[in-house]
Image: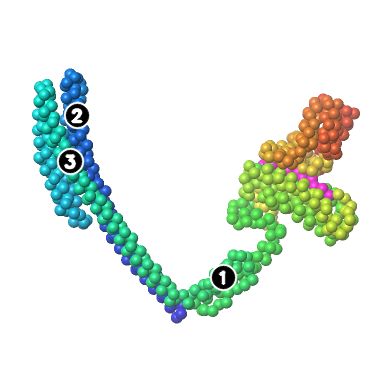
Amino acid sequence: MFRKSIRQKIVGIATGLIILAVITSLLSMVLASQVGHLLDELTNRYIPAYGHLARVNVRSLERALAMRRMMVARMQADEAGYAAAQKTFEEIAPIIKQEADAARKLIDAIINDPRTPSDNATLGRIDDRIDNIVNDLLVRLEDENATLLRQIEARDIAAAKQTTIRSDALRDEFNARIDAVRADMLSQVASAAKTVTTAQQRTIIISAVVTGIAAILGFLFAMLVGSGITRPVMKLLEGTREVEAGRLDGSITITTQDEIGQLSAAFNRMIETLRQNQRIRETFGRYINPRIAEGLLEQPAIAATEGQRRIMTVMFCDMKGFTRLSEGVTPRGLVKIMNLYLSTMSEPIHAQRGIIDKYIGDAIMAYWGAPFIEESEQAHLASLAAIDMIGRVAQLRKELPELLGVRAIPAECDVRIGIATGEALVGSIGSEFMMSYTVLGDTVNLASRLEGANKFYNSRCLISEATAAACEPTIALREIDRLVVLGQTQQQTVFEIMGRTEELTPAQAALRQHYSDGLTAYRAQRWDDAANAFAAALAAVPGDGPTTAMMARVAALRQQPPAADWDGAWHLEHK
């Protein structure tokens, strides 16, 4: 019964407000229609009538000017000028009559319209005055003009001057009477405008009053049922805010058995479900990349098992010295090392919007590409992540002994990174028991081989030519070599990431230049020039790994020169 009462009160409030809204709308429509009609009369009758009267005055002056031009042309024997002025004079005469008739027609329409208030008496007098001016004064003026034309035609200049004086007097009287009519008409226009403004203000006031009454009544109706509805609703609102803030510990006390009580019970069940989902998310969020999970939920199409060919950038990162480091560490200590290392190296990947595909022992596989980021960004972001990962090595070396509680670790750790960009198969891959959203293909293999190639050059980060082309404007690179990696037959131009372009030091710039000179001489089999250039590179940055490796290779090729068809590419036979 209580539920029904609430429903009835809500329906009553809605019905009352609807009735008030309908009354307000109807009243506003009636008042707006009246204002619209008044405004239409002002715009389409009063103002145009005044405009016609103003043009009567202007046309009269134009006709007088044409008459004087005719006289001047006749005195100067300018037949062409006389004809042009006469044509203008004759064309204006009917226009004056038309303008006066148009003004009278509009005034009559105002007088005959009973729907709008107007000073019909004054308007009637204006109409009569226009009629007298047109039928009396204008006729007399036309007679004088006709006499003047005959005198001009007869070249009776003396008589024409006298007639001109009389014509000017009549025209001045005509203009004065027209000006008086215009002044009275302008007063009627102002009065009509004031009437429109008053009607508008009355409409606004009445609408505001009716709207205020509706608001007050609605507020009173709401207060009548508010005590039974707002209290539990406020509790629901507080609970919702707690959920919005991520606090899922509380619940709502149910105090009624109506719809609000049922809603509160449903809300409590929802909170319990959210608690369970939160526990699941916290547990499995560490095993499944959250961005992949969100993508699979928001874009189910990416979960298709067929896979898609896309341009992707793939990164492999391995921990140098891990084998020696793990030999003298307990299993628990090794887990601590791995967790610290993987966390340290994973943060830059997350920061640069990369997707960590998997951890393979101490190796990290990650990728950048659609549908998570745009193709134009992926190589740049991967390179920035690599720079940040390399920059964290020094801090990692300090934290590892503290983590294990020793003064020094048995081997100095470092990272080896390989990055490749190219076409790869992307999609959900696996079996009916377990699926993984991952990337496959030659690009993945190339990134893995480049990571391993760091061993031969004692470098930290090698990238493919496609990656270098995509990130070169903002990333400082150095061409290292041309390689044919294990498992592939095509040679790859390999580059090393030196840092951000704006952060390149003079020593690094000199190293890059000397190394490039040495590489050019090396490929041309000018062994002495190559050795000198590489020596200069080592002088710029002592201990540089790629330079040391190339000097050793040059020394070996001096002893045993390559075959005649040697193309300068180096074949890696091991991972």
Q: CA distance from mark 1 to mark 2?
A: 87 Å
The residue under label 2 is 66
Residue 522 among those drawn in magenta: no
Circle nearer the viewer, 3 or 2: 3
- Residue closest to the eye, 498 or 84: 84
Q: Position of residue 366 (x, y in %)?
A: 71, 49
Residue segment shown in magenta: 413-425
Residue 343's quadrant in the figure? bottom right
The image quadrant that residue 52 belongs to is: top left
Q: Please name the residue shown 82% across and 48% down the image.
A: 414
Q: Earlier in the sequence, mark 3 or mark 1?
A: 3
Q: Position of residue 266 (x, y in %)?
A: 55, 72
Residue 414 counted in the magenta span: yes
Q: Residues within 10 Å of mark 2 (few under 14, many from 20)?
A: many
Circles 3 and 2: CB atoms closer than 8 Å: no
Real-space Cα separation, disc 3 to disc 1, in angstroms = 80 Å
Q: Secondary structure at mark 2?
A: helix
Q: Amino acid at mark 3?
A: Ala
**Quick check: can you spot residue 549?**
no
Mark 3 and mark 2: Cα distance apart in space: 20 Å
The tag earlier along the polypeptide, 3 or 2, is 2
- Horizontal and vertical percent position of residue 160: 12, 26
What residue is disc 1 on? 238
Residue shown at the point (79%, 54%) measured from the top left: 341
Task: Answer with left or right where residue 556 lies relative to residue 480.
Answer: right
Whether residue 521 is visible, yes or no, is: yes
Is the C-beta separation of discs 3 and 1 under 8 Å? no
